[in-house]
Amino acid sequence: MRVLVIGATGYVASRLIPTLLQRGHHVTAGARALERLDRFYWSDSVDRVEVNVLDQTSITNAIDPTIETVIYLVHGMDREDFRAVDRKAAENLVAVLPSTNVQRLVYLSGIVPDIDREALSEHLLSRLEVEETLSQASQTVITLRAAMIIGAGSASFELMSKLTRRLPITVVPYWMRHDVEPISIEDLTLAVEAAMTAAVSSGHYDVGGGHRIAYTDLLDLYAEVAGINRDQLHLPFLPETMVAKVAARITSVNTSTAQSLIESLREDMVAADTRWISELAADRSGSELTSVREAIQRSLTTPDTTVAPSARDPLGRLPGDRH
């Protein structure tokens, strides 16, 4: 299958594209700055195309007549106006698609808690708005909703890792004591690839790793696997904006990104069901997903640099990852 990955310089794409190549797909990597693709070991194995999702002409030029599937991995968490920008970008893509030969669009979103729309965080509301906009396309549109992604280089994993390592005590606000269902980047990439070819109609799927865990317990598990002794201090009154700013300062993560990730923790971020396995990846039914403990262990394992990047564990560090 000939597939265009929009947002090819991001973390998920860095692991997804090798999976697509291994499965025999012909990949075109779409990015605003093509030189940023040079840092990935697979960059010479893909076609490259410049694409600016805020410019309809750019999108039109990027989707050549051979492209059958578009994988949309665009999220603007690193800017203050990300919600408006993401919505406009999605509208541009939908406007362009009728003039292409694209048959399917796969979008990676976030878990949407079962609460009133008005109570959603800005981050999750933005993801939902993009999903709703893309669903207006006449093509088959499959949205995959994921919570925390475990893997070295994942923004949410790196935030948890750096906060645990750099603070002498783990401070947990009461509003953060909710459940989360992480998924390893390896399982997530398999879900995306399955969504490209599954005989299903448009819709969304929660893609969870199968293990629901309290976020406070996840922090303890990370510390245990990493061999770090950390006590937790639970405080009743810490505003999200303050926590995000402190987290950004400590971890060097962009403040908007940190706030987007942290505010998602004020609700349970768990999959509503396991339909993604039975309907998208039936060949995986009965097989084990990567456990949270194993995923953390593999993410923290020092890579063997004598082994070619293509043969290394995708959960571990790879060339091109941002530290």
Image (tube, rainbow, N blue to C red):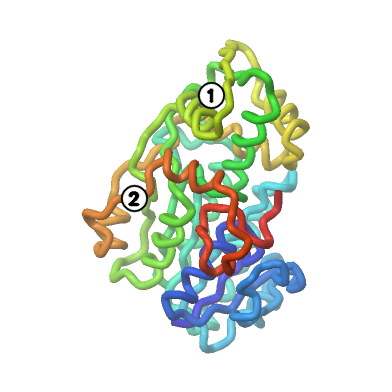
Q: As drawn, is 21 to the left or to the right of 199?
A: right
Q: Nearer the viewer, mark 1 or mark 2?
A: 2
Pick the front one: 74 or 82? 74
x then y, percent, for residue 63: 59, 81
Question: Horizontally, is 217 left or right of 28 in the view?
Answer: left
Give me the residue at 56% from left, 58% from top: 12
Q: Tell me the amino acid under the disc marked 1.
A: Met
Q: Quadrant of residue 64?
A: bottom right
Q: Which mark is residue 262?
A: none
Earlier-in-chain disc, 1 versus 2: 1
**Residue placed most toward the observer, 76 or 135:** 76
Give the x, y percent position of residue 319.
66, 62
Can the viewer see residue 118?
A: no
Residue at far left of view: 286
Q: Is residue 200 above or below residue 267?
A: below
Q: Residue at x 76, y 39 (%)?
A: 252
Reply above or below: 321 against 230.
below
Q: Is residue 201 in view from this perspective?
A: yes
| Residue matched to label 2 | 289
Front-lying residue, 215 or 139: 215
Residue located 38% across and 43% down the image: 291
Circle 2: residue type: Leu
Q: CA distance from mark 1 to mark 2?
A: 26 Å
User: Which quadrant holds residue 226?
Assistant: top right
Q: Is residue 194 above or below residue 292?
A: below
Q: Position of residue 118 (x, y in %)?
A: 52, 34
Q: Label 1: few (<14), some or many (≥20) within 10 Å?
A: many
Residue at coordinates 58% horizontally, 27% vertically from top-left? 228
Q: Is residue 180 left or right of residue 171?
A: left
Q: Which residue is mark 1?
A: 176
Q: Is residue 65 above or below residue 212?
A: below
